[in-house]
Amino acid sequence: MVSRPLDSYDVLRRFAPGTPLRIAVELIHGQGTGALIVIGSGSMLDALCSGGFSLHETTFTAQRLAELSKMDGGIVVDDERALITRANVHFIPDPTIETNETGTRFRTAERMALQTGNDVLAVSEESWRTAVVYRNGQRYELARPSDLLASANNSLNSLERLRRRLQSAEDRLTRAEVDDVVSSREVLLVLARATLVTRMFAEIERTLVALGGEANLITIQATDLIEGVDDLAENVFADYRKRRGKKSVFDRLSAVPTEELHDLSELAQILGFPDDEGMEPRGIRLLARVPRLPDSVRRSLVNHFRGFQRLLHASVADLEKVEGVGRARAHQLRRFFDRTIEMGDG
């Protein structure tokens, strides 16, 4: 699976709909006041605060935060202790810190985040109601839940289409394997489409994290669509790769832009495959589909027959000779291989 941007996911969870901080954002939007809120504590933060007033053991609630935002100054929230510690503060970050923002509030927010290492939330009071979180030099705009839901549903539809195309490519590969006419194109098509599916899922997952608990049904549907894709891609890659290595197929293709995944010649070069030439699998993907077959037996079968066609057409007697198979399992394998041949012929 593609790697997850942990900072981004943590920010999205912290400000997801239904969380106290996000409820505060909605209340501030509703009253049209805007806000500048630093989330954290420490001596560096204290040194950048001027004026305003300190609050003693004031429990943080969304309603209190919204009320305090009606004053002109900034607010400090220690969410680890669930306290509002300062209000109506003038923040004075280093003015030489570079920022790409234009408005005073957002320029101050970005500089405070960079200088203190704290999350800083800036909420505009203008009609377009922008809310932005700054962390570690990154800018995260908080989208409306309705916009996030629409985006998640559109992405889910795209994921469903990609998953069907991946299934079609896998079926095509299976038929080619049974007929012993596999070219690198069939293999690469499966790997390219599996990569597309995982990348689309990563986009949906980010949106679902931003939605918090408001997208449970979409989460279930998306998770169901991604199930088995990792294993499929890794088994296909293991079936055909010439060079051994610890990198997964997704790691190897991570530098390929999504719009270039259709270039199978480039993928062949990256993965060390021949360009549109005949290939023979080892039988790893075939055996991965056999129910309740131990990994040790799978390895023994692959090593014993050393080729898909020899494995696929092995007799019960031949299968019994492999360590760990036995007569009952040999018959089970033979029935499974016969069904595979029938599906391939179909």
Image: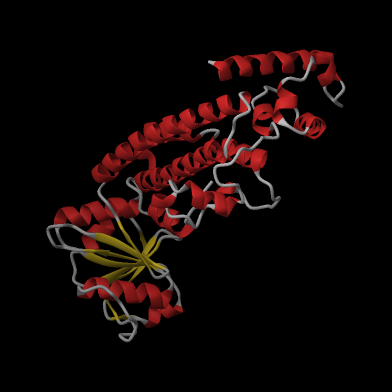
Percent of width and height locating residue 139: 34, 64
Residue located 38% across and 31% down the image: 217
Question: Please, is residue 86 above or below residue 32 in the view?
Answer: below
Give the side of residue 93 with respect to residue 123, left or right.
right
Judged from this view, the residue extending furthest toward the left is 127
Give the side of residue 341 with respect to residue 313, left or right.
left
Q: Is residue 47 visible?
A: yes
Residue located 39% across and 62% down the image: 83
Percent of width and height locating residue 327: 84, 14
Percent of width and height locating residue 51: 27, 81
Give the side of residue 69 with respect to residue 265, left or right.
left
Q: Is residue 251 visible?
A: no
Q: In front: 187, or 151?
A: 187
Percent of width and height locating residue 182: 59, 33
Question: Please, is residue 185 above or below residue 110 in the view?
Answer: above
Judged from this view, the residue extending furthest toward the front is 277
Residue located 27% across and 54% down the image: 24
Q: In front: 210, or 156?
A: 156
Q: Quadrant of residue 281?
A: top right
Give the side of residue 268 with respect to residue 332, left or right.
left
